Image (cartoon, rainbow, N blue to C red):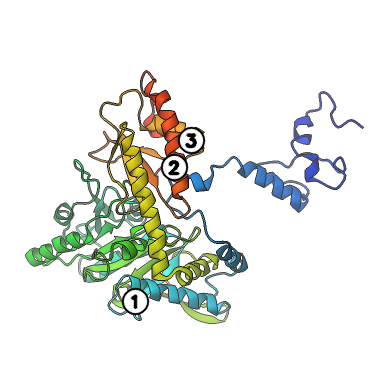
């Protein structure tokens, strides 16, 4: 019987599945390919289902060549084995999985010690699905503490809470303000300052300010915000007005870089005004996504009404994360990485990423076509734009052409007051080696002659030129 009959409307579906994906007999039991947008009527063999999904995912970008993401794209095989052994454990079932819960508690204690909490044994914190959830928790604590201090006038029309931050914050902070009805007061960029200015932040604070967010590693350019100077500006504000405004440090990336590479930088719980800190274990914490951490200086900074005592599956336990069920694999992987590397190991890995960033930024600058905004000496990240005399192409053309080579490098426009500036940004992570950086430079160098011959930039709609939204 022929496999193909001319005119059959099901021909393309019948031939969509490779016969070798099926039974031992490659022509046995051939049926239509499964539908894409509704459940199939019948089951598929596991090998067939796997291969169909696997083949479609080949069209994704290569994560190791994704220089847009901060998220970890490589871990040791042993970490992968541990994660596979724990992916069926639900983090919320602490009574059923007490050792997993204990590893989470140890990670919190290690971070509290790393961030110089006054008493790491009493610092409170939890794991989250990432920094976005951790920021939501920190923002909720700030708002609740402010509401308790202003119970005599909140809620009322003249007491709308606000949160002060730079315009460069990650979008999760805008979400927090929208979800929890907090006014977002943002310090714009000015000139060559691409993040928050301490004096400008203090000037935006008033009796309704629940806190100020400082970013220890801006996603726009990889620079640290001056947390100590911010706290000093708020100290001065308190001396002048009596307003006591706490600081939350969004250390999604930098809180796992600065303790190892910038030990003299004071940004953490050594500053009394810092009430809470978050980080992403799945960024420079060197764990696959998704895991984040939220820590408070002490129990006093986390209002007790936000901590729920849950009697679940036979155990009474406290929980203050937004999410409930999630796998324990990432928390176990975080503990493995802390145990595996220690301070010396983290320092070595992160110094390597910074060295790659510094070297690569220098090589990019030497082409003469680009101007560096940052060079990777804080976060292992650098941003650059085209030089003033380059008129044949723009950063969006560079991003598009690099994608043809497999490199995913975001091009985007800066926010308020610097919308005139469009840049490319390269994130150097563990696994992006000096060898890969050399290949990147070679590919960029091969593209430049063609770009220089263009009659002008080819990108007309910059808003849709990239899917990157930091």
- Residue 243 on image: x %, y %: 14, 65
Residue in view at x 48 percent, y 35 percent:
403
How far apart in space, not on screen, are marks 2 and 1 (Cα)? Answer: 44 Å
Residue at the extreme top:
455
Q: Disc 2 on helix, strand or loop? A: helix
- How far separated are the C-alphas under marks 3 and 1? 45 Å
Q: Is residue 395 above or below residue 94?
A: above
Q: Position of residue 133 (x, y in %)?
A: 41, 60
**Residue 109 is drawn in which quadrant?**
bottom left
Q: Secondary structure at mark 3?
A: helix
In this rendered view, identify the residue nearer to me: 412 or 173: 412
Of marks 3 and 2, the one in the foreground: 2
Which numbered disc, 3 or 2, marks the residue that appears first in the sequence?
Answer: 3
Mark 2 burial class by Cα count in 10 Å: few <14, some 14-19, many 20+: some
Q: Nearer the viewer, mark 3 or mark 1?
A: 3
The residue to which callout 1 is attached is 123
Q: Is residue 149 left or right of residue 311?
A: left
Disc 3 from disc 2: Cα separation: 17 Å
Relative placement, left or right, of 415 versus 190 is right
- Label 1 SS: loop
Q: Are marks 3 and 1 in contact (CB under 8 Å)?
A: no
| 195 versus 102 height, above or below | above
The answer to whether residue 94 of the structure is visible from this angle is no
Q: Is residue 92 visible?
A: yes
Locate residue 299, reporting x and y percent.
Answer: 32, 77
In what quadrant of the picture does the N terminus appear? top right
Q: Which mark is residue 438?
A: 2
């Amino acid at each position: 019987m022929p496999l193909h009959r001319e005119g059959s409307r099901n021909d393309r579906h019948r031939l969509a599945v490779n016969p070798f994906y099926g039974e031992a007999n490659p022509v046995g039991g051939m049926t239509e390919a499964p539908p894409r947008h509704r459940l199939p009527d019948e089951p598929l063999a596991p090998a067939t289902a796997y291969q169909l999904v696997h083949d479609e995912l080949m069209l994704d970008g290569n994560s190791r060549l994704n220089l847009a993401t901060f998220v970890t794209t490589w871990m040791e095989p042993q970490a992968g084995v541990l994660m596979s052994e724990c992916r069926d454990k639900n983090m919320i079932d602490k009574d059923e999985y007490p050792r997993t819960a204990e590893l989470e508690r140890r990670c919190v204690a290690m971070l509290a010690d790393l961030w110089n909490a006054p008493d790491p044994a009493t610092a409170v914190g939890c794991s989250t699905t990432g920094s976005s959830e951790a920021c939501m928790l920190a923002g909720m604590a700030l708002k609740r503490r402010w509401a308790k201090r202003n119970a005599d006038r909140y809620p009322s029309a003249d007491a709308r809470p606000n949160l002060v931050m730079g315009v460069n914050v990650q979008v999760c902070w805008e979400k927090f303000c929208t979800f929890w009805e907090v006014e977002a007061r943002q310090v714009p960029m000015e000139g060559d300052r691409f993040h928050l200015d301490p004096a400008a932040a203090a000037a935006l604070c008033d009796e309704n300010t629940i806190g100020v967010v400082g970013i220890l590693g801006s996603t726009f350019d990889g620079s640290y915000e001056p947390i100590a100077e911010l706290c000093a500006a708020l100290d001065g504000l308190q001396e002048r007005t009596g307003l006591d405004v706490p600081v939350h440090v969004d250390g999604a990336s930098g809180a796992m870089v600065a303790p190892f590479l910038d030990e003299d930088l004071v940004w953490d719980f050594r500053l009394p005004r810092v009430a809470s800190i978050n980080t992403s274990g799945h960024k420079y914490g060197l764990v696959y996504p998704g895991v984040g951490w939220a820590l408070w200086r002490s129990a006093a900074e986390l209002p007790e009404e936000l901590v729920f005592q849950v009697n679940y599956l036979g155990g009474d336990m406290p929980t203050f994360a937004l999410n409930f069920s999630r796998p324990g694999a990432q928390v176990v992987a975080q503990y493995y990485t802390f145990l595996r590397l220690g301070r010396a190991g983290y320092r070595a890995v992160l110094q390597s990423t910074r060295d790659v960033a510094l070297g690569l930024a220098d090589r990019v600058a030497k082409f003469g076509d680009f101007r560096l905004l940052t060079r990777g000496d804080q976060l292992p990240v650098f941003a650059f734009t085209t030089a003033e005399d380059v008129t044949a192409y723009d950063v969006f053309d560079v991003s598009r052409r690099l994608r043809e080579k497999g490199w995913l490098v975001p091009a985007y426009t800066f926010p308020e007051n610097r919308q005139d500036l469009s840049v490319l940004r390269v994130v150097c992570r563990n696994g992006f080696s000096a060898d890969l950086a050399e290949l990147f430079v070679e590919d960029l160098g091969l593209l430049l002659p063609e770009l220089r011959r263009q009659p002008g930039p080819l990108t007309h709609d910059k808003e849709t030129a990239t899917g990157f939204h930091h």
